[in-house]
Image (cartoon, rainbow, N blue to C red):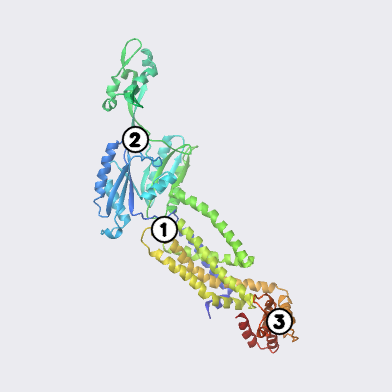
């Protein structure tokens, strides 16, 4: 006995097992990680190196050259290029203390060290850690720019805190960085550099200034001329004009004792040292004040390696909850970076997928002409997703946008197979086959087309599963989901869908009143053939025999057959022959004639 026959004979057991498999696959969903996009191997590395905010441009260039020399010693590295400061376009804001080092790698077959890319990154990171005063973060050139353009940060995850007080924001960001550092998979944890800029503060003694008859503006004018510079005249060269600014040289501006000895002319003729009128102090001031949506913002950044981004964010949110609750009123926390892109993509898919399913239902109704058959095809879709879920868990692959698109592709393949099978079922039913014979015969005749369709798609995705070239990281989730879903989709389409079709057909037959359309079709057949033979009762009593019912459907549909000219004599005499055979309780002629008519 075939698998289909066993499944049809025990529909409750079949549907129970299928439902159990579906529930088990749903239980596997919490084990699936999530991320925005799989990490694409660009064949290069990008290292963002940050120094102190008061680093000079000349010093940054010398340090960048030193880093390039050290990196060229690695046998996997082909060339190294560094960029310090901001480029001409405004989308890349960087100070002279920041340098992006782009490392171009040789083809993998030329490495010869036995290390993979992750091990190479670890080795480079340890080498750069020996250089004092540097803070490095590793990424890839395209990923680095995409993250910065979309979310304003260069890391996988950014914990953004918003509020009015910069000190409170910096304190929270430092605490968040300490928490993120202790989570498994956290790499390159850093806080946005908002402090570290040395600044000279001059606190003016108002009482001393009043004793000498000086105003605050007088004292500020002297300090401005000495430190910041003041425009003395204008230099005209042809059509161009240049402002001539007078100020102390850099060595004198950095000498606080020299500034305090600077003499200020008082209205009474006295020349008062500036140290008597103001107190000079070197303090640490904010290097930058970042804003987003009109609010001050400080970011704690982290890269995630060795685990999925969604699971890392969930753990980070749970551990940062007490710290977030301690924030004063008017402060809030957001999560950005790749996680922000993932959430945005999933929200859009949550709208697109239901709309697509609704459109599929409308198209199925237009194609099949029956709401029941359309819902029957859609009922097969959850079972098609079972294989995709199991494949993702087995391969330990996070669900990304690529995998989500693969699930949508899988739904399309499942709908196609369901339409092929249900449409053929309808064709057999119109030819007079019973529900049971329709299912067995339809699955038997459509097994090869469905299997060929599934195998063609399965084999077509097989190279994507083992590809190692550029873009293979994006293609692999697509192949895993589609190939895993094709296995369960084909199996369940040929087992579960026929079982549900039989149950639905049995209920329709039970709900049909006695003496309904089957008997009427037999009378129409006898009237069309002109025969007066009596119809023998069926085996169940009171109903028409199978041969009579089939002949009635054949005669009633004869007028709708799209063939030019009159029917051949042998075809026209088939109803009378079948009626005679039915009256003598012989079904062999009827079966033979049905084959001739279908042909």
Going from the N terminus, do you reach mark 3 or mark 2 first?
A: 2
Horizontal and vertical percent position of residue 267 = 36, 11
Q: CA distance from mark 3 to mark 2?
A: 97 Å
Depth order, front residue of 434/159: 434
Asked if residue 503 can be seen in this view, the reply is: yes
Q: Is 544 situated left or right of 33 in this image?
A: right
Circle 2 packing at 10 Å, graded few (<14), some (14-19), many (20+), is: some
Disc 3 target residue: 544
Q: Secondary structure at mark 1?
A: helix
Q: Secondary structure at mark 2?
A: loop
Above or below 85: residue 523: below
Asked if residue 280 can be seen in this view, the reply is: no
**Does the CB distance between marks 1 and 2 fall below 8 Å?**
no
Disc 1 target residue: 474
Q: CA distance from mark 1 to mark 2?
A: 41 Å
Position of the C terminus, as image quadrant, is bottom right
Residue at the spot 48% in from the left edge and 66% down from the top edge: 485
Horizontal and vertical percent position of residue 439 = 59, 76
Residue at the spot 33% in from the left edge and 54% down from the top edge: 43
Q: Closer to the observer: label 1 or label 2?
A: 1
Horizontal and vertical percent position of residue 321 = 46, 46
Depth order, front residue of 445/32: 445
Q: Secondary structure at mark 3?
A: loop
Residue at the spot 63% in from the left edge and 75% down from the top edge: 429
Going from the N terminus, do you reach mark 1 or mark 3 first?
A: 1
Disc 2 target residue: 196
């Amino acid at each position: 006995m075939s698998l289909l026959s066993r499944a049809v004979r025990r529909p409750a057991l079949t549907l129970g097992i299928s439902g159990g498999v579906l529930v088990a696959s749903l239980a596997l969903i919490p084990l699936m990680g999530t991320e925005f996009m799989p990490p694409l191997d660009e064949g290069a590395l990008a290292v963002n190196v940050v120094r102190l905010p008061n680093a000079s441009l000349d010093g940054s260039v010398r340090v960048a050259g030193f880093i390039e020399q050290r990196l060229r010693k690695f046998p996997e590295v082909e060339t190294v290029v560094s960029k310090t400061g901001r480029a001409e376009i405004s989308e890349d804001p960087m100070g002279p203390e920041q340098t992006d080092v782009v490392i171009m790698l040789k083809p993998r077959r030329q490495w010869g060290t036995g290390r993979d890319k992750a091990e190479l990154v670890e080795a480079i990171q340890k080498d750069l850690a020996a250089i004092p005063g540097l803070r490095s973060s590793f990424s890839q050139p395209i990923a680095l720019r995409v993250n910065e353009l979309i979310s304003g940060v260069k890391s996988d995850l950014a914990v953004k805190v918003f509020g009015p007080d910069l000190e409170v924001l910096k304190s929270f960001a430092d605490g968040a960085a300490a928490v993120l550092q202790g989570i498994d998979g956290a790499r390159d944890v850093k806080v946005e550099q908002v402090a570290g800029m040395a600044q000279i503060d001059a606190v003016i003694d108002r009482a001393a200034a009043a004793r000498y008859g000086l105003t605050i503006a007088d004292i500020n004018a002297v300090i401005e001329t000495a430190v910041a510079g003041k425009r003395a005249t204008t230099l005209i060269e042809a059509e161009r004009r240049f402002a001539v600014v007078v100020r102390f040289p850099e060595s004198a501006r950095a000498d606080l004792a020299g500034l305090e000895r600077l003499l200020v002319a008082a209205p009474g003729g006295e020349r008062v040292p500036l140290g008597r009128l103001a107190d000079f102090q070197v303090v640490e001031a904010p290097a930058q004040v970042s804003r987003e949506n009109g609010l001050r913002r400080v970011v704690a950044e982290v890269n995630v390696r060795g685990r999925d981004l969604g699971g890392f964010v969930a753990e980070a949110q749970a551990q940062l909850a007490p710290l977030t609750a301690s924030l004063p009123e008017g402060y809030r926390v957001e999560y950005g970076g790749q996680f922000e892109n993932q959430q945005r993509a999933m929200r859009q898919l949550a709208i697109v997928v239901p709309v697509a399913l609704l459109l599929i239902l409308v198209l199925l109704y237009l194609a099949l002409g029956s709401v029941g058959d359309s819902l029957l095809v859609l009922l097969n879709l959850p079972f098609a997703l079972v294989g995709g879920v199991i494949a993702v868990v087995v391969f330990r692959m996070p669900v990304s946008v690529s995998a989500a698109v693969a699930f949508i592709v899988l739904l399309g393949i499942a709908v196609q197979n369901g339409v092929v099978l249900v449409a053929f079922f309808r064709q057999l039913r119109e030819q007079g086959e019973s529900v049971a014979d329709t299912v067995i015969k339809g699955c038997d005749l459509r097994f090869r087309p469905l299997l060929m369709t599934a195998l063609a798609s399965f084999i077509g995705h097989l190279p994507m599963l083992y590809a190692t070239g550029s873009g293979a990281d994006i293609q692999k989730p697509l192949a895993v989901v589609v190939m895993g879903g094709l296995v369960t989709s084909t199996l369940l389409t040929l087992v579960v869908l026929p079982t549900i079709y039989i149950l639905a057909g049995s209920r329709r037959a039970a709900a049909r009143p006695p003496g309904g359309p089957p008997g009427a079709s037999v009378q129409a057949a006898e009237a069309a053939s002109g025969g007066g033979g009596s119809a023998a009762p069926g085996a169940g009593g009171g109903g028409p025999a199978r041969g009579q019912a089939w002949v009635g459907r054949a005669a009633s549909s004869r007028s709708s057959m799209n063939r030019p000219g009159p029917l051949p004599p042998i075809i026209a005499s088939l109803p009378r022959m079948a009626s005679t055979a039915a009256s003598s309780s012989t079904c062999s002629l009827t079966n033979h004639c049905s084959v001739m008519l279908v042909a």
